[in-house]
Amino acid sequence: MEETDEQTEVQDPRLRRRLVLIPCPLQGHMTPMLQLATLLYSKGFSITIAHTHIIFPNQSNYPHFSFQSIISGGKPPSDVKTFIFYINNNCADPLKECLLSLLSKSDKQDYEPVVCIISDAMMYFAKDVADSLKLPRMVLRTSSAISYDAFTYVLQLNQQGCFPIQESRLEERFPDIPPLKFKDLPTMKTSDGSSLYEFLLKMLLTTKASSGLIWNTFQDLEKLALTSITNDVHIPLFAIGPLHKTVTTISSTTSLLPQDSTCISWLDKQSPNSVIYVSYGSIVGMDQTEFVEIAWGLANCGHPFLWVIRPNSVANCSQWEKLLPDGFHEIVRGKCCIVQWAPQQDVLAHHAVGGFWTHSGWNSTLESICEGVPMLCRPCFGDQAVNARFVSEEWRVGLNLENGLEREEIVRFIRKLMEGKEREEMMVRVKDLKEKAKNCINQGGSSLESLQSLINYILSFNK
Ligand code: UDX
């Protein structure tokens, strides 16, 4: 899509509409919401971001948006699941106040009327607020369509009393969503099943009760899942991704952490397709044993590597350097670059990068596909195992490191990803998907058409 971040279809201000967007304050959710905001702004909508003070974007990067805080103060829980409950339990009243103030302003001629709110699916508190004000509410799904399908089945299976699934069945294929295995369903990874179900139920019920669903995906990638969801939800679906390719916003503007660009100069010195890039996204951590095995696997694989190690991402260890034995640094000298946070999209687009070892978060998966980089998947929780299964067995553009994480196995998998016939075959398929991702946002492409339908749909709210 040839877009700039400037408004390209600016209308008479009296006809403009304001959208209030409610992101979930986590990197993997905030990024696509800000990209959607930028895209809709470029189409003539005015944008208000209703955010928490816990994690929020740098407002100076978005001078055209207005920002409204819907919660401040208080120490949020550090565990992600409890954190999401905390937000949902505390943000409804502040959001209502914020919307009431915007609605009263729009009575004045110079302020655009709020026609719709768009909330992240995990921000389910927005439903009751929108209903009470009779405002249409749309939901942005920041993860894959297949994972939505999987979440739906988790609830059904739970209602049928099928959980916990016997240990012996975890490796079996899940017949309703091939090629998933039972162990890929998100429920298997949590000890506290009941709160997971409660969370999923609230999220899915409020999603289905919305006026429409916006997806950061594209038809050629997830046609089957999108069709199955259309049949299930009976509300309009708009698959308009990959969002990061539809806007020209540079990735640093959506990043909540400062990106270390020194790794790009390091990549400049490496041979084409030689480097394995390793990053587990913004939440996933690892224990100390895993960390040491990964380090040795990377040191022994024979390929240069760029490794993102976020502060405090190794459990109970503030100085991961101390976990590496004497001699490690000598072995990897000149062959590795370690940063706390990278400009990931630029890294994946760099000609030196030949593979991506990822936790299979949806943004990382899409970003890798869009740059034609095959993946080594090491999923951890939530939607990640579902994404990894599809990457490795449906789209066949990566490998799934799903069993033990020990150094010899890591070396074997990295070599398979970076060398030989299997790599060549994955490269053909990932390049094909890259091309499809490019085409869907160009003239006549499915995502561009969906975006136009979405705009028309939002405009219809004001009639
Ligand atoms: C979370 C969940 O873990 C994920 O499964 C879900 O699909 C979305 O929410 P996260 O773990 O952060 O997200 O992973 P991901 O979705 O891949 O998003 C990470 C984002 O951070 C990507 O956009 C990536 O480009 C960016 N990133 C990551 C950086 O900019 N620099 C880095 O060093 C690492």
Image (spheres, grey):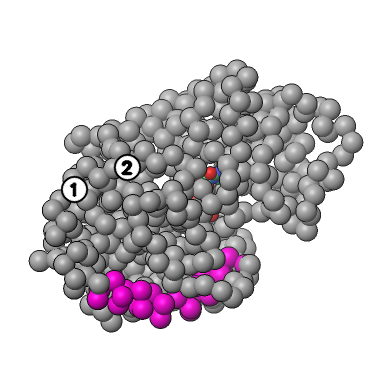
**Which residue lies most toward the right here?**
326
Q: Residues within 10 Å of mark 2 (few under 14, many from 20)?
A: some
Residue at coordinates 54% horizontally, 33% vertically from top-left?
A: 347
Question: In the image, which residues are magenta?
Answer: 79-104
At label 2, the amino acid type is Asp
Q: Is residue 400 magenta?
A: no
Where's the N terminus, which quadrant? top left
Q: Is residue 88 magenta?
A: yes
Identify which residue, 338 or 157, lies in the foreground: 338
Question: Disc 1 versus disc 2: distance between alpha carbons?
Answer: 12 Å
Residue visible at 59% across and 71% down in the picture: 76
Picture quarter containing residue 308?
top right
Residue ID for mark 2: 5
> In the structure shown, which secondary structural element does the residue marked by tag 1 occupy?
loop
Q: Is residue 305 left or right of residue 319?
A: left
Of all residues, the one furthest to the left in this rendering is 463
- Residue 42 place in picture, x, y as percent: 27, 46
Q: Is residue 297 visible?
A: yes
Residue 445 % position (x, y):
23, 37
